[in-house]
């Protein structure tokens, strides 16, 4: 294990079991429709990859990239679209797949933006939700886990692009955040 990792918050087994449950729940809710799952790059890549494999029925996948944190750990509230969807979402059932909901500013912006394109429906599936941190009223229809307000890495989540490949979610040792940030 990497020397900078402090404690495991969610093990691989726990994550996989919950993602399977979410997949079944989402599939049942969208039965008879063909939802478009929108993965928010890059943090949601592992989550969406596992989620779609836990789903059955027809679905499509697209991605968006937005800038939120840059290389710092604070949300600026300024969101820029770095990569937009490849397809039109008019009259589509859109499910945004996000890694983590912290202040909620990023998702709030994204939902508002996508709503202007007139999808039939738009919902959110967030793997992690930081307890009590949301600055905007936003409750994802689907959520994996509520976690304490600590900076976490793994299962898609990074610190300066590292740790995304861990199959578990963990905190970093004290001091790592300070030394790793520019
Ligand atoms: P929000 O706009 O909700 O404050 O931030 C959302 C984005 O910030 C997430 O998609 C994620 O990229 C990043 N983020 C928020 N909390 C954490 C965290 O604890 N660890 C990591 N690695 N990224 C985080």
Image (cartoon, rainbow, N blue to C red):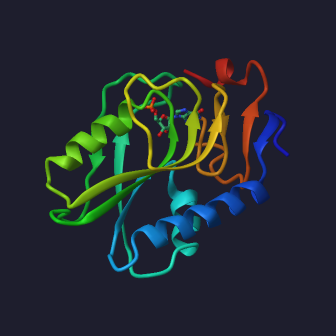
Which residue: 30% across, 32% down?
A: 79
Q: Is residue 145 above or below residue 27?
A: above
The answer to whether residue 108 is seen in the rendering is yes
Q: Is residue 14 above or below residue 169?
A: below
In the image, taking residue 8 as reference, residue 181 lies left or right, namely left
Image quadrant where residue 165 sits: bottom right
Which residue: 73% across, 33% down?
A: 171
User: Along the line of sight, which residue is nearer the eye, 126 or 29?
Assistant: 29
Q: Is residue 35 above or below residue 114?
A: below
Which residue: 52% across, 23% down?
A: 133
In the image, taking residue 56 as reference, residue 155 lies left or right, namely right
User: Along the line of sight, which residue is nearer the eye, 58 or 61?
Assistant: 58
Residue 23 location in percent, x, y?
55, 67
Q: Is residue 182 above or below residue 68?
A: above
Which residue: 58% across, 72% down?
A: 54
Residue 116 location in percent, x, y?
14, 47
In the image, taking residue 71 as reference, residue 6 lies left or right, namely right
The quarter of the rendered structure image containing the C terminus is top right
Residue 68 location in percent, x, y?
40, 33
Residue 174 location in percent, x, y?
77, 20
User: Along the line of sight, which residue is nearer the eye, 180 or 74?
Assistant: 74
The answer to whether residue 160 is seen in the rendering is no
Q: Could you tell me how many numbered marks the image carries?
A: 0
Image quadrant where residue 159 sits: top right
């Amino acid at each position: 294990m990497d020397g900078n990792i402090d404690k495991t918050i969610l093990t691989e087994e726990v994550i996989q079991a919950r993602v399977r449950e979410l997949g079944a729940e989402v599939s049942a809710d969208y039965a008879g429709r063909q939802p478009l799952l929108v993965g928010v790059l890059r943090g949601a890549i592992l989550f969406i990859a596992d989620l779609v494999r836990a789903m059955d029925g027809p679905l499509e996948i697209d991605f968006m990239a937005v800038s939120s944190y840059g290389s710092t750990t604070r949300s600026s509230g300024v969101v820029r679209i770095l990569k937009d969807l490849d397809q039109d979402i008019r009259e589509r059932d859109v499910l945004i797949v996000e890694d983590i909901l912290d202040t909620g500013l990023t998702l709030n912006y994204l939902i508002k933006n996508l709503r202007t394109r007139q999808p039939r429906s738009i919902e959110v599936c967030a793997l992690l939700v930081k307890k009590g941190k949301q600055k905007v009223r936003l409750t994802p229809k689907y959520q994996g886990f509520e976690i304490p307000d600590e900076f976490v890495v793994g299962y898609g989540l990074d610190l300066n692009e590292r740790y995304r490949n861990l199959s578990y979610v963990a905190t970093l040792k004290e001091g790592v955040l300070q030394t790793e940030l520019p």
